[in-house]
Image: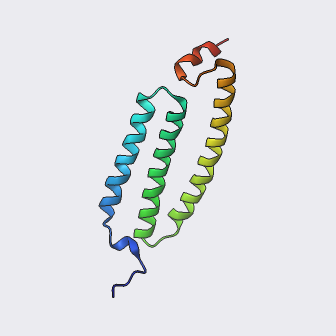
Amino acid sequence: MPDITNDMQFIPLSYYIAFCTALFAIGVIGVLVKRNALIIFMSVELMLNSANLLLAAFSAYRNDPAGQIFVFFIMVVAAAEVAIGLALLVMIYRSTHTIDINVLNKLKW
């Protein structure tokens, strides 16, 4: 029976790098192409999560828990970013009745 104490050894690190690169690229494309503020927030979260996954993979590959601790702090900052971003979206929706970021030019003084 194989030793399953370190699951990261079964999947090569290059697979994690390729997967996280694809996730990050999808997030960048979502930020650059879409005009809906919710989609942009989701794309930013996708980019943060791809970086978190890559940090956790490197951390487990090197048997160093520092990367996983860093992932925890990034997740806390991402949760705060989502809370503030959604609050801003609600305020923008109340004033413009849309979440299209092209309409935000109306908010200029």
Q: Indicate the position of residue 32 as horizontal and vertical percent values.
A: 42, 30
- In depth, the one of 74 and 37 nearer the eye is 37
Q: Indicate the position of residue 54 as horizontal and vertical percent values.
A: 42, 57
Q: Split into 4 quadrants, where in the image is the N terminus? A: bottom left
Q: Nearer the viewer, residue 90 or 72?
A: 90
Left or right position of 34 against 78: left
Q: Residue 72: percent from the left, percent from the top?
A: 58, 59
- Residue positioned 32% across, 68% down in the render: 11
Asked if residue 26 lies left or right of residue 80, the reply is left
Which residue is outermost to the bottom? 1
Taking the spot 47% from the left edge, 39% from the top edge, the residue there is 43
Left or right of residue 100: residue 51: left
Q: Residue at x 44, y 29 (%)?
A: 34
| Quadrant housing residue 90 | top right
**103 w.r.t. 1: above or below:** above
Q: In the rendered view, how is the structure colored?
A: rainbow
Residue 9 horizontal/vertical position (percent): 35, 73
Tell me if residue 49 comes above or below residue 86 in the rendering: below
Q: How many marks?
A: 0
Q: Is 88 above or below relative to 50?
A: above
Say which quadrant the C terminus sits in.
top right
- Name the residue: 45% across, 33% down: 31
Snapshot quadrant of residue 57 = bottom left
